[in-house]
Image: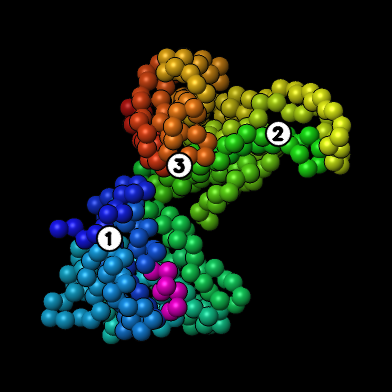
Amino acid sequence: MMHPSKDIMFKKSKILEGKKIALCTCGSVAILKAPELARELMRNGAEVFVIMSYNSQRLISPIMLEWATGNPVVTEITGKIEHIMLSKSVDLVIIAPATANTIGKIAVGIDDTPVTSLVSSALGFGVPILIVPAMHGSMYKNPMVLKNMEKLASMGIRIIQPEMVEDRAKFPDIEDIMEEVIAILHKKDLTGKRILITAGPTRSYIDSIRFLTNSSSGKMGYAFAKEAYARGANVTLISGPSNIHPPKKIRTIYVETTEEMLNAVKNCLSESKYDIIIMAAAPLDFAVENKHEGKISSNSSLTIKLNPLPKIIEVAREMAKDAFIIGFKAEYGLRKEELISKAKEKLLECGADLIIANDLSTPFTGFSSDTNEVYVIDKFGSVIHMPLASKREIASKILDIYVRLCKNV
């Protein structure tokens, strides 16, 4: 019978399906974040097994982590040689939180706790290891600790830098850890590719505080950025206003207006050659002709004149003739046939290689939704329907199409 705690498996995605992860905990108060990390790994499909150092057991009960994962927790090495059994069966070892003490022991090959014994064995088996340090700022700045981390990095161990807050090297956001985990375990079929992505809405100001915009959240573009990064690509993201934050290793350029987004695209294409350009943003097609400086009185009647703006995707095609361009066509309340027809028209007009069409009026597919349902149209007129799935999964499937097309060239 499945443990009741495992009913959250795959609730967010299947991106870690089939992966087994050893989560090692050390004696830092940041261990309070460990159950949350374990649950997030499970929501994305991973099976999680916890190994606790002796000091970590003084801060949080093993029972809590058994509840979180639905699996027995290793608290000591017994005749079952748990460190060998686990290290040769898992796909990744995460030490979160990692203390200065444990980092130092790993750096010099000491294995006198369940955590260090597991890591020692995992290194021998060639299992990837990810370390998430968390400690007082003075300890993190200790030259010996920094030297030890440099040594571990030189051995191929991945380290996520902590958040420095109030002189504390704090546990980073769970989302940042998740993206690094996914990047370690993901296929790397985009290694060496340079990808430029636009995301989010743009604004056109009426006065100094009011503006026209749309309800785009940027979630689709950010999903592409995270997926491409995880698959080994060198990603540049140009983002309009959004509440989402990208992985720290993704170069991100923030803009507000359509004109700023257009200029950012031009600058990027002038500086570098990109293999793929993904126009997932929803920039305004019009700009207010005469912006009022200051604040317009709310008692005044107001007439606004809008002027058309250049299509960013058309400028991108003109500047990057050899790039593979993916565009989007969002409509509202159209029949399937009309939606696909309009998408084909846009593909021909802008010279894109793929157009992604979706209807914003259908349930769970709007700008702010975490899911989407799309039709993918290529320049030969072929149509692929992608049923409702997370935007990350949609992005992954679209990039799969690009990889297949490149292999067939």
Q: Residue at x 35, y 24 (%)?
A: 384
Q: Quadrant of residue 209?
A: top right
Give percent across and percent down for residue 270: 63, 36
Q: Is residue 350 above or below residue 103?
A: above
Give the alpha-carbon distance from disc 2 to disc 3, as whole Å: 24 Å
Query: Nearest the camera: 368 or 77?
Result: 368
Q: Amino acid at mark 1?
A: Ser
- The answer to which of marks 2 and 1 sits earlier in the sequence is 1
Q: Is residue 366 above or below residue 237?
A: above
- Mark 1: give few (<14), some (14-19) or many (20+) Cα within 10 Å: some
Tell me, yes or no, whether the two marked residues, 2 and 1, touch with CB atoms within 8 Å: no
Can see residue 125?
no
Query: Nearest the camera: 256 or 70?
Result: 70
| Residue wearing tag 3 | 370
Q: State which mark lies toward you, 2 or 1.
A: 1
Q: Quadrant of residue 272?
A: top right
Range of residues picked out in magenta: 28-34
Can see residue 43?
yes
| Residue wearing tag 1 | 5
